[in-house]
Every structure is written in C-alpha cells, then in structure tokens.
Image (cartoon, rainbow, N blue to C red):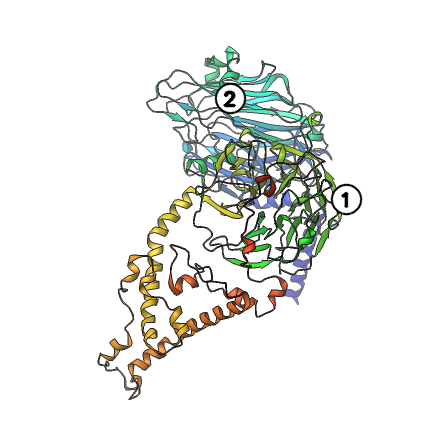
Amino acid sequence: MGVLICSMVVLALICQSHSLGVKNPLHRFKRYQESIYSDPNECSKTRPALVLTNPNNFSLDIRMPGVIPTESESYLCVAVPVPTGRESYIVDFMPHATMDTAHHMLLYGCRTPYSTTGFWDCGGSHGTCDDAAKIIYAWAKNAPPTKLPKDVGFKVGGDSRITYFVLQIHYGDITAFRDHHRDCSGLTLRMTSKPQPFIAGMYLMMSVDTVIPPGKKVTNADIACSYQSYPMYAFAFRTHTHSLGQVVSGYRVRDDRWTLIGRQSPQLPQAFYPASSPVEVRYGDKLAARCVFSGEGKTSTTYIGGTSEDEMCNFYIMYYMDSRHAVPYANCMENGRSDLFRGIPKEANMPIPLTPDMVAMMHGHSHHMGAKSHPQEDSVLLQPKREEEEVLDKGFHLEEMVDWPEVQLSLGQVSGLALDSEDNLVIFHRGDHRWGAGSFDPQFMYQQKSLGPIQQSTILLVDPTNGNVLKASGRNMFYLPHGITTDEKNNYWVTDVALHQVFKLGSDGGDKPLVVLGRAFQPGSDTSHFCQPTDVAVDPLTGNIYVSDGYCNSRILKFSPDGKYLAHWGAGSSDRRKRIPFLVPHSLAFLPDRREVCVADRENGRIQCFLAETGEFVKEIKKEEFGDTVFAVAYAPDHGGLIYAVNGAPPSGQPAPKGFIVNYSTKEILDSFSPDTQEFKMPHDIVVTRDGSVFVGDAAADSVIKFVSSEKAEHRSVKKGGIEVQEIEETETFLQAQLKPVLKASFPKASVANAPVAHSHPHPQAAAPHKSPAPTANQQQGKAPQKPEDGARQAPEGVSPALVTTLLLIPLVVVIAIGVFIRWRKARVYGDDCEVKLEPGSSGGILGKLRGKAGGGLNLGNFFASHKGYTRKGFDRLSTEGSDQEKDEEASDSENEEYSAPPPPAASSSS
C-alpha cells in the first residue's frame, strides 16, 4: 500500500511539473538552472541566474559552472536557453571576468548548441553550435561594459532563430589555476520583453588571404563591400588582430568621401568602443576597413589563420536598424580594390602609440605584447567562415566523375533534378518531346497537343553511385516537363510548361495525381492559373509548397500542402525604388536552416532569397561571373551555408556555362566548375547530396553529369586503378574457372552461350588462372580419394567424384538458368532489339552483368516488377526506343534550347 501511495505522489509531482512547464515560459530556463548549477561551488552559491526587476525587465546571469581548465589555450563553452519563448531584447552587457583568468570571452546566439547539459570543450571539432552561430558580444583584456543606445536591443527568442546563448571562454594560460580553484567567469545580460524600435546587429569585416612578409615594415590588409540593404547606423566598433597588428580602421565611403566609423590599436583592450556619433550607412554606400601590420623581427612569412604563428584582421561594426526590416547579422570578406583605397585618409596608416597607462591596462597579459603571439584568438568567432576556409585549404574543388553513370541512361531533354530522402537521384526528362520554336503561340498556348503525352517514363529514380535505374514512372502524363522536387514522404511535385500545371504524384509511381494545380493548357495570371510554371520548393517543416511562375508570369506563389492558395509575391530589393521584376523565375531552393526560399531569376542573372513565412526580401546575389543568366540554384547547409548555381549559355564568343559554389553569408564565389570531357551546353538544373556530390542536368546534351570533390575523385581513381578492380578481376576469374566443367557437360546451348570465356576480359590478368582455382572434374578423377577420419563421414560406395562436383555446381547452374530465362523474358516483353552490350572497359562475363555494368544486365527489380503489376503503376523498364535518344540535328540552338527569354509579353522562350 505504501509503495502505491508513493508512486501516486511521484506521478502527481511529475504531472504538476509538466503543467507548470507548459504554462510558464521560464520552465526551460529553470531546468537549465537546476542541471547546470546542481554542484555546490563558489560559482553557484551567491548568485541567482535570473532576476526579474519588473514584469518587462529582467537580468540573466551566464557563467561557467565552476570549471577547472586542464591545459592552456583551451576553449570551454556552456549553453543557456533564452529564458522566454517570446521575443526579448538585450540592452546591456556586464562582463564578469579578468584577463588574469580569461584570455577572451565570446557570446553567441543560435538555435541548436552542440550541447545543452554541462560544459564542453569547444575549441576542436565540437564547436559552439550545430547550426550557424551568430556573434552577439565579445570581451578581452579587461574591457569595460558595453551599453547599447536607448531604444536599441539585440533581438532573441520568438522568430529571431536564437533560442540559446552559448558562452565561450578562452583560457590562455592556466597557471592561475594551480590552486585548483573553480572558475565562474561570465557576463550578465540586461534584457527586456518590451519591443524596441531599433534592432541591434553585428557586421563583421575580415581579411582572409593577407600575407605578411618577414621583416617588412608595413603590410596593409584592405577589405571593402558594397552595402545593399536598408539603412543601418553604426554606433560601436571593435578591432582585432594578433601581435603584428598596429592599427585597424573602418570607414563608410560615399561619393568618394570617407567617414570614420572607428579606429583603434588592436593591442588595447578589445572592447566595443563607441563611435564618435552614429554613422548612417545607406544602400549603395561602401564599407571599407584597413589593418596595418608590421613584419619586423619576424623570420618567416605570416598568414591569416588561428594558430599562434598566424594573424587575423577583423573590424566589427555594432549597428542598429529600424525593427521593421532589420538584418541582424552580415559579413564582408572581399578584398578592397587598390583604386578605392587610394583615397583612404592618412590616419589609417598611422600606428597608435601605446602610453604607459595603456600598457598598465593590459597588466598580466603577455600574449599580444610579448614575443609569443596567442594561438586561436577568436577562432570560433569566425567559425562559419573558418569551416569554408578549411574546405578550400584542402583543395576543395568539384571535378567531373567521368565514368558516371556506369550504365547507359536513355534520356530526352533533362529539365529537372531532385533527391529523395535517401539521397537517390530523381531525373525529370522529356523523352521524345522537345521544346522548339513552334511549341507555343504568342499567347503561350501549346501548339503540339496532337503529339499526345510523352509515352516514355519521364521520372527516373536513379542510384547516385552507379546510375542504375531503381524505379521509373510518369508515362503518358506530361507534354513538356520542367521542374521537380520531393517532399518529406518522397512524393514528387512537378511542373509542366505545356499544361501550365503543377502536380503532386505519389512515391508509389501511381499514374493518378494526388494534387493538381492550374488548368490544363490554359495559361493565366490569377491564383488558379499558371503560365509556364518552372519549379516547386517544399517546406519540410510545414509542408507548404512554393511555385515559381514562370516564363510569362513574374511571381512566386505559396500553397498549403493540399493545394490551397496562401500568398504570392514578386521580386525584391533592398531599395524599393530600384526594384526590378523577375524575368523568368526559373528555379527554387528551400533553405531549411534559414527558413528561406531562394529563386534563380534566370534572365536577370541573379539569385534572390525571401523569408518563407512572409515572402519578405532578404538578399540578392548577383556576380559578374554569372554573366546574364542564372538557370538553377541549390543549397547545402554545410560550412555556414553554400549556394550552388549554374548559369546558362552566353552569347556567342563568350565562355561556356559553369557551375558555382557561393558563400551564402558573404556572397563570395568559393569555386567554379565545369565538366572535363565536354562542355556544358545548357545546364538546366542542379542538386547537391548530403555527401557533397553535385549533379547537373543538361537539357541540350540530354544528360546528367556528376561532380565530386577533387579529393574524392583522386581517392576513387587510385582505388579503382588498384586494389578494388584487382579484387573484382580475381573474383571473376574464379567464377570462370568454376564454369569450365559446365562447358564440358551436356547443358542447353543457351547456358553455354552465356558463360564467359577467358579471352573476353580486357585485362591481361583475366586470361591467367586464379592462384587457387577450383579443381575440374577430370582433375578430381585423377586423384585417389582421401581416407575419412570417421566411418560415418565416408561417402557411399560407388558415388563418383565427378557426380559430387556436379552436385556442388548445381546452384551456379541455377543462377545461369535464371539469367537465361530473364533474357528470354525481356526479349518477349521489350522486343528483339534489346541487345546486351558491354561498355568498353567494363568488367566482362557474368559478374559484369550481375553488377549492372552491361546495358542489358540482370535487373531483378525490373523482373519482379513486370510480374507484380507494377507496370500499370509506372514502374516499368525505361523505354529503349530510338526516339528517346534522337535529336533534331537540323534544328538550330534557338529552336531546341532556351538560351534567351522572350521579351514579355509577346513571345515565349524555350525551356
């Protein structure tokens, strides 16, 4: 009875705790308090972590939970939840640290910290946050508190994407911990839930490739970017270098006039110093910064990096913007042009002398002033960019995988690519239909309905490793396919520019659409019609879909998962007076970690990104390298966010199209790529897998090209040329040796015809016998049988060894028989013209067919599909009719390809 009562009491307490947690927005923070400060120590005895001063205002104390660093130059982090689910604002920062203990201290905001319990080592691979970490505050060298201007606050909680704070402390020298005391350094945030008229933000200017020669007295690192957003007001700044930095200066440049934002010696306490007066920065202004270094006394070249032998050049701008269109974080990492910096004020080149009072401020801190520079100063502050630098330092570059696919894919114009939840590749192509000059009239009415729908399977699910077709669907449904994407359940969302419609198709390959949007063959511009819609993006969180519409409309439409119209918007701009409408919004990419939709605005040669929830404009990426067109866009959250894009065919005489990898935050082009064995003709769509492989569909070449990093390509080529292929060849020779008795036995001729012969293998090793081949029947007969150890194991008298061998070979013969039957079955189903052809250089013999290397190789999926009724659902073998591969050789490029957009609204361009 007592046990029952105790159980009921515990259950009641749990329920009460849960209900309070639901009702009280501070419940999550209280759980953090109880877990992080459960150990009694000097850090948690005397201070409450959260203090409510009135219903709107409160203070949050963020401290290290009594840590004892075990080695110098270590980085420790602790995560603290934002104490309310509603929006709140940080208005003051109060540091609680001394340089004798903490080298520097950083506060980040993010949604997913690396850990939510206890503290962790965040100086290595773990880092601070699993998503993008946003710098909110920095402190070093006994810097004073930072107070924000009135009516200005850093927005956290709510829709800010910041649900956790992460405090990082760099313990440079742990000699202060020889007495094993616990450290509780940190800071106090003064916060309010009252909405602030102005939102604070951080703009980081950083040099990434400065080189400082040894002994050179002066080396300048120049950074400059054009500002393209709503007005911001710079009210504070912070400088940062390592020991070689002499002075760092930041300016706004407008009409060739330089206005100082801040200038300071990076050897002084690295606090946020107030600007003399807030400096307004408007659209079109330039932000410029210079770091002056001296290499005197150095005997080796110094580079930008995070180690004790490297340097850094950072200029931080703390700013505020009107809350209605605030952008809280931005970066600039572009090298400044020499012609711009000819006009920089002379003060930027003059080092700031350090007075005795200034030196006294840095008492006890020798890393900057002594001969030994400190390692990894602020290294995690630049974590997103540093990850990208690490990728580039490893020689990251995409190269074509020339032997992909390993089987022949029979494709028409490849219009769309997608990936399912298992990273399998989805190809959307046009079979024997082609978009030509006569496909549409000036009113965008499709003129070739008499051709009927495409009879071939237009949707192919393909193995990304070898190109084998896993499923095929989409027969007799589409006229001119264009875009495709998948949702969380692997349903297909597709567009057809001839039908002017959007479809949702089930992942089972059924030929009945689950959702249909638009009216068949009826172009229009209202909420129930499209005009040549181009692509679809799906929000994996809400299931909402976004449609780019299209060749004759200039808008993005938003629908619920069941197809209910929700909203639409047009092109955006930081300056509404200079808004340029979409000109063929051609491709969409959903950014799940940022909750944004990016659009490849094809004929404007740009990428624009919008908040998925509201359609509010976020940014534009437009680079000279893109040329006049951007055909497709994809996104990967790796390394702080990477945009993948392909441009289109330029006017004659200009370079061929390329693919690009762009840093989402800085808009910097990190890499450009193109195939080695051919040229892009019209790269039409692009996708990137979780492992970094990139696929590009070329609509003019009727092909899909796979790219991998140069590091992977090199590793793969070495492996393929050595151990891996050798193992395959040895295994195949072994199979051939096993088949020799079969050739001498009286089996059907079909089996013999399908058996490999030694000379069929291209590699010289194939003709040689395996080191330990299985003995033939004749060899076995020539040997005396061994005496068994046990009479019970002795073979029955009169049983021939040849018969035993034959019985052992029966399973192999069965496999061959199945192969013969399948081939006969395919000849019945697909016609006698379905030949078995081996690609040059592919592994010959039965093993090559089992591995799918042959064009007519064994495909059990197709075999069973034809016997289970799957053909009716569309999972039939890809048609091998010649019309799938034919091209209109006499037609011009303009007839077959979509090199240029129509001047709206008179004519249509090909897609």
- Is residue 18 depicted above or below 774 in this figure? above
Q: Earlier in the sequence, mark 2 or mark 1?
A: 2
Q: Quadrant of the C terminus?
A: top right
Q: CA distance from mark 2 to mark 1?
A: 46 Å
Q: Residues within 10 Å of mark 1 (few under 14, many from 20)?
A: some
Q: Nearer the viewer, residue 666 or 27?
A: 666
Q: Nearer the viewer, residue 336 or 804?
A: 804
- Is residue 768 depicted above or below 478 in this figure? below
The picture quadrant where one finds residue 458 is bottom right
Q: Nearer the viewer, residue 258 or 513?
A: 513
- Left or right: 544, with 700 as reference point: right
For this orientation, the residue located farthest to the front is 890
- Is residue 258 depicted above or below 482 in this figure? above
Q: Amino acid at mark 1?
A: Thr
For this orientation, the residue located farthest to the bottom is 797
* x, y percent for residue 593: 60, 42
For image coordinates 65% across by 46% down, the residue present is 536
Q: Can see residue 593?
A: no
For image coordinates 44% across by 39% down, the residue present is 396
Q: Secondary structure at mark 1?
A: loop
* x, y percent for residue 705: 49, 46
Residue at which label 2 appears:
336
Which mark identifies residue 44?
A: none
Residues at discs 2 and 1 in contact (Cβ within 8 Å): no
Which mark identifies residue 527?
A: 1
Q: Secondary structure at mark 2?
A: loop
Q: Can see residue 156?
A: yes
Q: Amino acid at mark 2?
A: Gly
* x, y percent for residue 740: 32, 71
- Left or right: 868, with 769 as reference point: right
Q: Exactly how many numbered labels are in the figure?
A: 2
* x, y percent for residue 463: 51, 55
